[in-house]
Image (cartoon, rainbow, N blue to C red):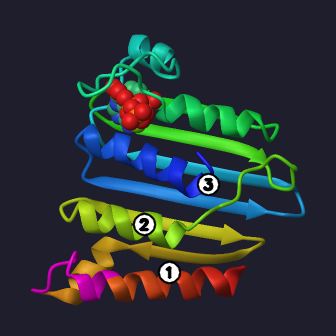
Amino acid sequence: MQDLSLHILDVAENGIAAGADLVQMTVEEDTKEDRLTITIEDNGRGMSPDFLARALDPFVTTRTTRRVGLGLSLFQQSAQGAEGDLKVDSTPGLGTKVIVRMRHGHIDRKPMGDMAETVTTLIQGNPDVDFVYVHRRNGREFSLDTREIRSELEEIAINNPEVIGLIQDNLRSSLEEIA
Ligand SMILES: Nc1ncnc2c1ncn2[C@@H]1O[C@H](COP(=O)(O)OP(=O)(O)OP(=O)(O)O)[C@@H](O)[C@H]1O
Ligand SMILES: [Mg+2]
């Protein structure tokens, strides 16, 4: 996987597959402390301690289309390649939180990629799920919450192509502002 945004997409999709109706993603960039922290939290069915212990194994999956599950282990490899780590905290019936840390300036740190694309792909494909996206960079912050967008839209669907286009433009310009 080339970009961190694609790892984030994959982990968010895990939460949706686990029945979540709220997925919260946070990206925190601190260039002075040389830290990049990503958290993806969902309120899906969670994993038992037993399953969680094996969840990072690329041969563990509940997928039926393919025998290997690679999402979490590939993200872990990416983090480790930039002197970081990936931790999963999960409670059956409550949800799952994936915390990924790495060195921001590490030569092998993968690029952020297109977070505007990741977030709008998630919203467009999962109109019944709510998403919160917070991006902090050196003290500046930007956040998006589909629950707020929904209340402003009233009867218009959140996955209406024009709405998605507006959300994407807004994300792109907000991300540029804090860059
Ligand atoms: N947020 C989550 N909530 C509940 N179960 C999860 C969650 N994330 C992962 N799992 C469980 O861990 C398994 C491994 O996840 P992983 O993302 O590594 O692979 P996958 O989703 O099965 O396949 P891939 O990501 O390659 O499409 C999943 O099949 C699922 O059973
Ligand atoms: Mg996955």
Magenta region, residue range: 155-164
Q: Mark 1 points at which residue?
A: 171
* Residue 114 found in image quarter: bottom right
Q: Which of marks 3 and 1 is nearer the N terminus?
A: 3
**The one of 96 and 55 positioned closer to us in this rendering:** 55
Give the numbered dot on residue 87. none
Q: Earlier in the sequence, mark 2 or mark 1?
A: 2
In the picture, measured across the screen, residue 149 lies left or right of residue 77, that is: left
Q: Which quarter of the rendered image does ligand 2 occupy?
A: top left
Q: Do the residues labelled 2 and 1 touch (CB within 8 Å)?
A: yes
Q: Between label 3 and label 1, give the one nearer the viewer.
A: 3
Q: Is residue 156 found inside the magenta-colored segment of the image?
A: yes
Q: Is residue 100 above or below residue 73?
A: below
Q: Which amino acid does label 2 sit on?
A: Val
> At x 80% / y 41%, what residue is drawn?
82
Query: Callout 1: few (<14), some (14-19), or many (20+) C-alpha neighbours within 10 Å?
Result: many
Q: Which amino acid does label 3 sit on?
A: Asp
Q: Does the residue labelled 1 lie within 8 Å of ligand 2?
A: no
Q: Please tell me whether mark 2 sits on a helix, a strand or a loop.
A: helix
Q: Mark 2 points at which residue?
A: 119
Q: With 61 as the anchor, is 93 left or right in this view?
A: left
Query: Residue 124's x, y, as percent?
Result: 27, 68
Residue at x 72% of width, y 71% of height: 137
Label 2, ligand 1: CB separation under 8 Å: no
The residue to which callout 3 is attached is: 3
Q: Main secondary structure of the magenta part?
A: loop
Q: Provide residue 7's location: percent of width, then percent of height.
A: 53, 47
Residue 47 in picture, x, y percent from top left: 36, 24
> Does any portion of residue 124 appear in the rendered image?
yes
Q: Distance between the residues labelled 3 and 2?
A: 14 Å
